[in-house]
Image (cartoon, coloured by chain):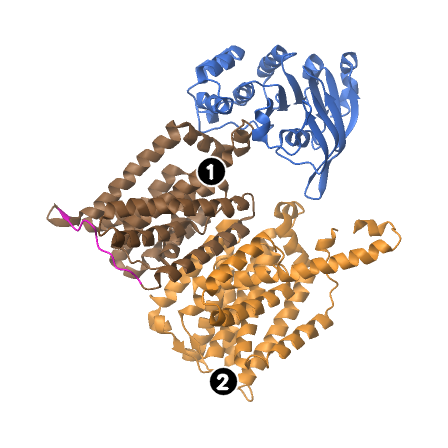
Chain colours: A orange, B blue, C brown
Amino acid sequence: MPLKNAPMRDYGGIGFLVIAAGFLLITPILSTHRMTDFMIFCIFAMSFDLLYGYMGRLSFGHMLFLGTGAYGAGLFIKYINGNPLLAILVGIVVAGLLGMLLGLIIVRTTGACFALINLAFNHIGFFLVLSPLREITRGEDGFGVSATKLGFLNFGSRPIMFGFVFLCLLLVFYFLKRLTSSPYGIMIRSIKEDETRVRFLGYNTYLYKWLTFVLAGSIAGLAGALTALNYNYVNPNAMDVNSNVGVVFACLIGGAGNLYGALIGGVTYMIISNFLPIYIHRWEMFLGFSLLIITFRFRRGIWGYFQGIWGNIIKNKVIRKPIEGGAADL
Amino acid sequence: MLEIKNLDVAYGHAKALHDISLKIEKGQMAFLIGRNGAGKTTLLKTIIGLLKPKKGSITYQGNEISNLSPEELYLTGLRYVAQEKKVFGNLTVRENIEIAAYASREPIDRTLEKVMSIYPKLKDFLKTKAGQLSGGQRQILLVGRALVGDPKLLLIDEPTQGLAAIVIEDIVKILSGLKDKVSAVIVEQNLAMVNLLADRVHILKEGKIAREIMDKSEISDTRGLEEYL
Amino acid sequence: MIYTILYGFSIGAILYFISIGLSLTFGTMRVINFAHTLTYTIGVYALITLFAFLKGYFVLAAILAVIIVIPISYVIERFIIRRLYGESLDYTFIATFAVSLIGVDAIKWIWGVNPYPMKDPIGEYLMFWGLSLPIYRILIVIIAILLFVALNFFFKKTIVGKIVVAALDDKDGVRCLGINVDKYFSIVFILGSALAALGGVLYAPISSIHPYMGLSILLLSFAVVIVGGMGNLKGTFISAFALGMVMSITARYWSQGAETMVFIVMAIVLIFKPIDI
C-alpha cells in the first residue's frame, strides 16, 4: 500500500486523551461559551466529513440537517416537553428521519448533482421554516428555548452546557472512529475510490451510501439540537444555506477523510470566523484566498500535511533496515 | 522514423507499459497485436501525446516528442484514429472534414476531393449528421479525417473492430493504397489483415513486448500469432 | 395575466443571458463555475459607476460595463478555471466559490454594502389591450431572442462555433486534429461571462442591487442549466423561459415561494434525470 495512504496506527486511547486535553487546554484562553460553540461546530464538521471525506460526496446543503435538529429539539421543548435530553433525542431522530427520506433519492446521485440537490433541499427547508410554517416556527424572528432542569443537568448554566457538549464531542468522535476503522468504514472508503468495483463484488453500495447519509444527517441533527440548547434560541439561521461554506472550509483545511482533520479544521475555522474579522476587516477575502491556496496546493489539508511528514520519517527509518520482502511494499 | 526506448506508462500507480522499445522505419506498416488490456491502446495514446510516459523516450523524425501535445504533433504529420470510433456526431460529414482541414489550412474543396477519391461512397453522406452513420461509415470518415493535410505517420487503433466483412474489405483496400506512401502503426486483432498488410508485427503481452517479427514470411504463420490474442 | 406572462418572460430572458455561459463552461470544460455570476455583479456595479459618470447615457454605460468585464473574466479563466480542467467536481466547486467570495468582498469594499436604487431607463409603457406594459421588459425579451438566433448562427455556421460543438462531442478528437481547443474554450468562457454581465446590466434597473445579488441568481441559473441540460443551447433557452414563467406564476399566488418553486422543479428533474458527472 502506498505510504501516503497508510493509516496512522490507531493510537486509540492516546488520541482520545490528546483531543480531550487539547480542548480543555484551549478553553481557559477563550470563554466556555465560545468553546461550546466550537465543539458543536466540530461535531457538525465530523458529520460532514463522514459524507465528504470518507464517502467522497460533497454536499452544499448539510445545514439542512443541523437546522432540522435545532428546530426539532426547539419545537419539542416549546410545545411538548421541556426535557432537554428528550429534546436532543427528538432532534437527532427528526434529522435522521429526514435523512432517511431524502437519502432514498439523493444518494443515487453523485458529484455536482449531489451537491446541488442537497443545496436545493436546504434552500427549500430554509424557506419552509421562514414562511409557510411561520405559525409554528415564528418565521424570521425565531423563538426562545428554555429547557427544564433535570436534577443537576441545568443547560442554562454554561459550565454544565460545556461539559455536556464536551461529552457529546468525545462520544461522537469515539463512535465515528470505531465506525470508520470497522469493515463498514473500509466499505465506505472503497465506495469513494471506485464504486463500480465494489458493486461488482456483490455489495449493495446503495444501502451503505444511504446509511452513511442518514448517519451524517443524524449527527448533524445532534449538533443542531445542541445549538438550540446552547443559545436558548432557534431561528432560520440554523438552516442558512450560506453557512455551508464554513463546514466545507473546515474539512478542507483540516484534511478531508480524517476525523482528527475535521476537528482541527473545525477549530481553525471557528477561530478564523470569530477572531479574524476583528483584526482583518476583509476577512472573507482572506478566506477566499486561503481556500484557493488550499485547493491548489494543500489538498490534504493541515492534518494530511503532517501525516505526509510522519510517513516520510517512517520511510527513512525503514529504509535503513535491510530490505526484506515486506518492506518493498512501502 | 519513430523510435521508442524504454517506455514506462502508468495510470496512477498501475503500470500499463513496462520498458517498451521498438522502431518503425519510414514507409512501413507495423502492426501491434495482443490481448485486450495488453497495453496497445495505451501505447498509441502515449505516442500521440494523450498520455505522458513515466519514463523513457519517444523520438520521431529525430526529435524527442514524449512531452508534446497532440495539437503540436498534428503539424508534424502524426495522425491518430481512436478505438472508440467517435465522430463529431452533431456535425455533418462535410463539417467533420472541415474541422480536419482547419489546422492544416488546406482549402476545403481540395480536402473533400482527396477524401472522396479515397472513398467515393462518402459523397452521398456529406450532408448527413455524423452521429447517424453506421459503424463502418464512421470508420471510413475517421480514416478520411486522418488523411487530411500531410499525414506522415498514422496511428490507428483497431480499425476493423465490430465491422461487417464488406466494410473491412474497403478499409483494407484503403490501407493498401497507402502503403509505402505513409507510415503506420496499427493495432489489430484481425490476423488476416495483419497477414495482408504488415511489414512487421510487434506483439504486446501484459504491457511488455513479447515478440517482434520483422520478417514478412514469418507473419504468414497465423497460428503462431493466434496464441497471443 | 398578461403582466404575469411578460414578467415571466423577462425574468426568463435574464436567466437565459446568465445561464448560457454557465451551460457552455460546463459543457466544454466540465467545470462548474460558482463564480460565474461574479461578472454579473461586477457588470452591474460598473454600470452604476459609469452611469453616474456618463451622466445618464444608459446604453453607452451598459455597453462599457459589459466590456469592462471581459479582462476580469480573462484573468479568472487564465489563473483559476484553466487549472481546474479535469479536476474533481468538489475542488472546482470550492475553488470557484473562493473566487466568488473574494470578488463579492472586493465589491463590498469598493462600493459598500448598501443597495443602490436604479430606475427603468425607458420608463415608457406600451398600451396593449387596455394594459400598460413596460417597454423595457419587452425589449429585454426581444434582445434575448436575438441573442438566441445569433448564438445559433455562431454555433452552426461559423468554424469556431463548429469547433466548439465538435469539442463538446469529442474533445480529444479535436485535439488530435491539431486544434488547440483550450484556446477556444477560453473564448467561450469570456463570451459567457460577458453575457452574464449583459444580463446583470439589463436586469439592474428593475431589480435590487446589492453585493450578493450574484449569489441569489446563481442558484437559479444552476437550476436552469440542470433542467435544460448542460451544454445544450436550445435546452437552456427553453428552460430559462420556462423557469422564468414558473417564478412569475408562483409569485402571483405566493410571493415568496417563487425561487423555492424553481428549486423544487430542479430537484424533481435531478431525481428523474440525474446528471452523471
Query: Which label sits on residue A156?
Result: 2
Residue C120 painted magenta: yes
Q: Which residue is located at x 75 percent, y 56 percent?
A: A312
Against C195, residue C115 (above or below) is below
Q: Is residue C277 found left or right of B52 in the rendered image?
A: left
Mark 1 falls within which chain? Answer: C
Nearer-the-camera pick, C50 or A297:
C50
Residue tagged by mark 1? C185
Which secondary structure type mostly characterizes the magenta part of the structure?
loop
The answer to whether residue C127 is magenta is no
Q: Which amino acid, mark 1?
A: Phe
Residue B174: image x %, image y %?
59, 13
Give percent across and percent down for residue A306.
Answer: 68, 61
Residue sitting at x 45%, y 58%: C101
Question: Quadrant of residue B195 in the image?
Answer: top right
| CA–CA distance in space, label 2 to label 1 | 58 Å
Whether residue C1 is visible here, answered yes or no, is: no
Q: Chain of mark 2?
A: A
Q: Which residues are magenta?
A: C115-126
Q: Residue at point 62% right, 76% down? A: A23
- Report helix, strand or loop for mark 1: helix
- The verdict on a common chain for dots 2 and 1 is no
- Which amino acid does the dot numbered 2 rest on? Gly
In front: label 2 or label 1? 1
Q: Residues within 10 Å of mark 2 (few under 14, many from 20)?
A: some
Compare residues B174 and B8 and report the one nearer the observer.
B8
Q: Is residue A94 placed above or below C12 in the rendered structure? A: below
Residue at 54%, 77% in the rendered image = A36
Per the image, label 2 sits on a secondary structure element best described as loop
